[in-house]
Amino acid sequence: MNEIFCNLLEKDLVIEINTSSLRKGHEQTMPGRELLEIYRSNGGKYATIGSDAHAAEDVGADYATAKELLKEAGLQEVIYRRRMKINEIQK
């Protein structure tokens, strides 16, 4: 995982915390806390949050859970539009 995260960071890419697994009965987001901590230990600073919604009622599902996970992992949320970073969300 260290090598994968280092490659992402070298390319200035950001990971996404995807909450769809929570809707499907799993206990963690994808990635979960352990992987986010590894990402952070390799120099990761930012992450996006996604709900992988395929229905209107799932848009933004479990956003608060992912936001808290970001905080616990010491990461900053960012939003991208058309693959361009447009905003760092203030804490």
Image (cartoon, rainbow, N blue to C red):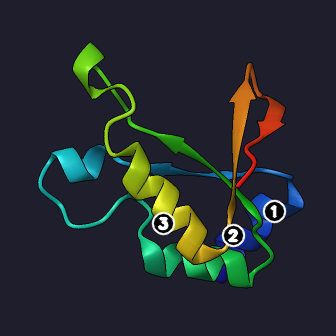
Asked if labels 2 and 3 touch by Cβ distance under 8 angstroms, the answer is no
Q: Secondary structure at mark 2?
A: helix
- In the rendered structure, which amino acid carries the disc numbered 2? Phe
Residue 81: give x, y in percent of width and height: 73, 22
Q: CA distance from mark 3 to mark 2?
A: 18 Å
The local crowd at label 1, few if under 14, some if 14 to 19, many if 20 or more residues have their Cα within 10 Å, is: some
Earlier sequence position, callout 1 versus callout 3: 1
State the mark number for residue 9: 1
State the mark number for residue 69: 3
For the residues carrying marks 3 and 2, which lies nearer the camera in this image? Answer: 3
- Decide: is 20 above or below 86: below
Q: Is residue 11 left or right of residue 27?
A: right
The local crowd at label 2, few if under 14, some if 14 to 19, many if 20 or more residues have their Cα within 10 Å, is: many
Asked if labels 2 and 1 touch by Cβ distance under 8 angstroms, the answer is yes
Q: Which residue is mark 2?
A: 5
Earlier sequence position, callout 3 versus callout 2: 2
| Residue at the image point whose x is 38% and y is 56% from the top | 65
